[in-house]
Amino acid sequence: MPVVVFGIAIIAVQLLTVFADRPQFMTQFTMTGYYSLVIIGLCLLMGYAGQISLGHAGFFAIGGYISAFLTTHDLTPYKDNIVLAALSKTGILTAAQDLYGGGSLVFHPWAAFITAIVITIAIAYVIGGPVLKLKGHYLAMATLGFGTIVYKLVLGTGFFGAADGLSDIPGFRILPGLEVSGKTGIRVQNYYIAWGLVVLGMLLLTNLIHSRVGRALRSIHSAEDAANAMGVNTTRYKLQIFVLSAVFAAMGGVFLTHYNGGIGPSEASIMKSVRYVAIVAIGGMANLWGALSMGIILNFLSLRGYFGSYDDAIFGAILIVIMLFAPEGLLRSEVLQGIKMRFSPGKGSGSKEA
């Protein structure tokens, strides 16, 4: 039922932008959709598996940079190589047009996407294995270190564009007639592609948390030692959820990169990871819908420039305030719970008067 309401809300927002003659708002809403993939993946990791990560901007950047590099790096000088020749015949490599109108040989966007996801999974497994043995602020610092490494690598590596990043990234043709691209003429189409992915992600994750796996995750979050004693393989579950949340971040990075036509080092910055954690915290650690709602509101406001140059400061302040006064999230705080109780049938002011 919530997914149906969510779907209706997506359509309603698109129609409102048309009636309000603000079609440009859909650009920010589309970008918000891709950032929402990171948010819901991180919410699963933090809220349900009880593991904090300050390195998810790194996974976002890994997905975006790998796809951007593979779909723009010209392999024409190596086209006679036996391996590249075979890849060309299978369609993994495709002809494209470079910035100056010349021909180039690059990876097909689908091949680049799959490569980005596979590399993300491999890195998440390698990182997650040892890191998830840590707890609390030790885990936070370790993931922070991972994010810092990724940021410095993309900032200092020439073929990733260094401080300028990568630009002129081609559109991602998902299916004939469906392309992830920032072209104005397909703005509505891109809006629905982005939010269609979010709906699919929410369907997957809500089913997951209501399954046996979800119960195991909640037991790990509540009492890991007790869950271990009851036979729950906590190490395996934590690692799998860490990898899954990294994949969600990488997917967001790939699609947003093709939508924007570029990616820069700021997407891998520590403040981006802090922002993701702050949004999950304010929405509710174990509240997928709350985290998604807060992600939509805060990311949209940020992308519209309402926070100005105080953008990072505001998300940092949000994180501090939430940790101090509502560590379970604003949408789960006692204030909102009190409001909910007040308006619940038989529990509000009316029942007291009776």
Image (cartoon, rainbow, N blue to C red):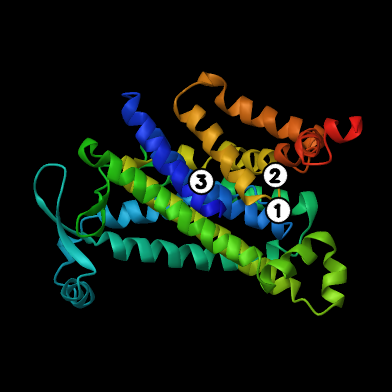
Q: Where the N terminus falls, by quadrant?
A: bottom right
Q: Does the residue at mark 2 contact the one at mark 1 (Cβ under 8 Å)? A: yes
Q: Residue at x 87, y 36 (%)?
A: 351
Left or right: 61 in relation to 189: right
Distance, label 2 to label 1, CA atoms, is 8 Å
Circle 2 SS class: loop
Q: Residues within 10 Å of mark 3 (few under 14, many from 20)?
A: many
Residue 36, label in figure: 3
Residue at image mark 2: 284
Q: Position of residue 10 (x, y in %)?
A: 43, 43
Distance from disc 2 to disc 3, alpha carbons, whole Å, reads: 14 Å
Q: Is residue 215 above or below residue 60?
A: below
Q: Name the kind of residue labelled 3 in the image.
A: Ser
Q: Amino acid at mark 2?
A: Gly
Q: Are marks 2 and 3 in contact (CB under 8 Å)?
A: no
Residue at 61% from the left image edge and 52% from the top image edge: 42
Q: Residue at x 57, y 45 (%)?
A: 292
- Name the residue tied to disc 1: 47
The image shows residue 244, relative to residue 147, as above or below, that is below
Q: Earlier in the sequence, mark 2 or mark 3?
A: 3
